[in-house]
Amino acid sequence: WRPAGQDNQGTFLSVAVAPNFSSSNLVMAGSAEGGLYISTNKGDTYDIRKFDRRTVRDIWFSPQFGTDGTVYAAVDNFLYKSTNGGANFDPMAYAPGSQQFPAPVRRVLTSPNYHNTDNDLWVVVEGLGAFYHDYDGDLGAAGWQYTGPVLRPWMYDMAIALYEKGLELAP
């Protein structure tokens, strides 16, 4: 290991490498001081996207990032989405008329079948457990569907795996 990127820029809570890293050299890092650091040269230097001093807790690339340019950022009680490789981010609606989740978003994941058979997106919200949103349209304007705490309400992370009978969630 060797230090890379910006010096003395505070605490970093998340680092994500683009699925097409071998061709894009794209790395993103989320800061507790409200910035999303974006590098297109394997982390040697970074440009910063500010989120009004909010904490960037997680970054998640679409499995098809190389073709769709989609990346999500969990920023305090908000979830942001970019469809242009991180050049611009827009807040996603949590409920009709509201973009703010009831607590900080700790983790963002897509279904293992994202863009192949579904566009499902999952988030972990601090103290509340997992939320799920079905972008295939089943929920319509209802917004996010609360799945409840999978094992305990204070989960901070989650993994999703496919198996013969469906999806398996692991906090």
Image: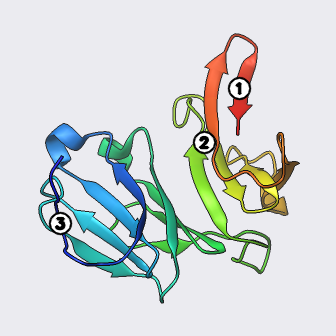
- Along the viewing direction, whichever of 95 and 105 lies nearer the viewer: 105
The tag earlier along the polypeptide, 2 or 3, is 3
Q: Residue at x 70, y 10 (%)?
A: 164
Q: Is residue 95 left or right of residue 18?
A: right
Question: Residue farthest to the bottom?
Answer: 52
Q: Which disc number belongs to residue 119?
A: 2
Q: Is residue 30 left or right of residue 26?
A: right
Secondary structure of residue under mark 3: loop
Q: Badge 2, how many Cα within 10 Å: few under 14, some, many 20+?
A: some
Q: How is the image coloured?
A: rainbow
The residue where tag 3 is placed is 5
Residue 45 location, x and y as percent? 14, 67
Q: Amino acid at mark 3?
A: Gly
Q: Badges 1 and 2: C-beta atoms under 8 Å apart?
A: no
Secondary structure of residue under mark 2: loop
Disc 1 to disc 3, C-alpha distance? 37 Å
Label 2 or label 3, whichever lies nearer to me, is 3
| Residue 16 appears in view | yes
